[in-house]
Structure formats: C-alpha cells, structure tokens
Amino acid sequence: MNIGILIIGDEILSGKRKDGHFAHVVEALASRRLELAWCRIAGDVPARIVQNLRETYASGDLVFSFGGIGATPDDHTRQCAAEAADVAMQRHPDAVREIEAQFGAEAYPRRILMADLPAGSVVIPNPVNRVPGFSLRHHHFLPGFPQMAWPMMEWVLDTHYPEMRDLAPESEEIFTVLDISESYLLDLMNDFVARYPDVRFSSLPHLGVDGVRRIEFGLKGRHALVAEALGFLQGEIAQRGYKMQAGRVTE
C-alpha cells in the first residue's frame, strides 16, 4: 500500500501560507521506516477536489488529506469526499457526541455542521478541540491546522495500521560522477535498470558554479542487492574512465 497526501487550500497555491504538512509527513513516516509515494496540492474548487479523490480512492492507497473539513463556505472537503465515493452525507453520532462534549449548547446551530460526514465514515479523535476528522476508504481527512492534524495522523497510523513499519528500502547508496553529462551514460543506465529491476534508481544532473557537470546517482533497496548493484554500476563507470566521489553533490 502506497502512502500519499492531499493538501487542500487556495492559500497554499497562492503563497499566502506556506505548507508545513509535506515535510512533517516525510519525517513522521521515516520514523516508522515508511516512505511517502506522492503528494498533491489542490485549491478550494469542489470539482477538482472530487476529481482528485475519485482517482485516489481508485488507487487503493493510504491517503492523508489536510484541510477543508470545517463549516465555512470555503470548506468543501467533507462534501467532496462523499460525492467522490458516491455516498450521502449523514450526521455522524460519534462526531455529534464529541462536538457536544466540547461545546455544549454552543454546538448548535453551526458547529454541529461539522458532524455531517460521508456515510460509512469512522471518526478520528481531535486532541485539541474534539472536532473530529474522519476516515473513509483508507483516506483520512484531517484539519489544516498542524497542531491538530499531526497528532491525529499519528493516531491513525498507530490505531489502524500498526503493522505498517519497516517497509522503506533497507539501504541507500549515493555517489557522484564528475565532469560528465547524462547522455554519455544513458546506455549504461538503461542496462542497469534492466539488470536490477528491484533496485530503485535515480540520476540527478547538476551544473556546478564552476560550470562542471556532475551526475548524482542514488540506489535504494535490500542491502545485499544494493551492494551488488553498486559494485556493478561503479565498475562500469570506472571502466569508461570517469571519476567518482562518495556522497551527494556539494557546490
């Protein structure tokens, strides 16, 4: 199961607010030896949110969605999640209990609207103000506020996916080839990928401030396979007469 995130909000796309979710999710997953497979950012346009959710529902991926689950006119995520799943909106009794417990009589008539969730949802407890998020089809819809969303994401992982740990590649090797452009090693790269399909391969070209071209190669996978693949790739590059150095490109 791949893991993705959907970040919703015009303020992110306009630059009025800087996103912090991406970096935090990468770090939180890394602490469990998991990796983020993809990230999407969508504005507050219902049709676009629905389109994204239909695609991600169909993927079967584990998805965390941040933002848009409030009750203001620019919050569309709850309704879009229902439309994309072809289910109705219903007032969720667990969400009602949480909101009433926090706000009492002041839950009505407006705050209680946040208890209207897609049919079949399971609530995600909010440790800050008890207005819950919700889960539907391996999608977990969280507030945009980091102080609420991040502990809620941790709760989802601990509660619903405790077995999802140590799935990231065991080993990563990075080295840099000096004074070369990618075209000179393209045939070798294609041969490498064919020989080692289970090793994740990356090639990042760099043009240094000194005008010298460099390529940073990255290999990820099981320890033994990465070690074998690294030996093959570096050996072939050395035979072609190019110089290498360990680690990432530094300017």
Image (cartoon, rainbow, N blue to C red):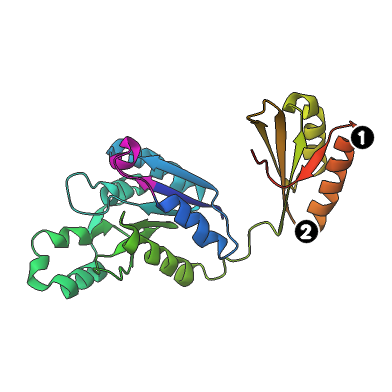
Q: Could you say which quadrant of the image residue 134 lies in?
A: bottom left
Front label number (1 vs 2): 1
Q: Residues within 10 Å of mark 1 (few under 14, many from 20)?
A: few
Q: How many marks?
A: 2
Question: Does 96 sit above or below residue 242?
Answer: below
Image coordinates for residue 139, horizontal then vertical, percent: 42, 55
Whether residue 1 sits left or right of residue 237 in the image: it is left
Instruction: Identify residue for label 2.
Output: 223
Q: Can the viewer see residue 121 in this picture?
A: no
| Left or right of 204, for residue 189 | right
Decide: is 183 above or below 10: above
Question: Where residue 101 appears, x then y in whole percent?
Answer: 18, 75
The structure residue drawn at horizontal position 82% and vertical position 53%, both measured from the top left corner, is 227
| Part of the protein shown in magenta | 7-19
The local crowd at label 2, few if under 14, some if 14 to 19, many if 20 or more residues have their Cα within 10 Å, is some
Residue carrying label 1? 239
- Mark-to-mark CA distance, 1 and 2: 24 Å
Location of residue 135 in the rendering, given as x and y in whole percent from the top left corner: 37, 60
- Image quarter where the C terminus lies is top right
What residue is shown at x 21% (from left), y 73% (from top)? 97
Question: At numbered mark 1, what does the secondary structure look like: helix, strand or loop?
Answer: helix
Which mark is on residue 43?
none
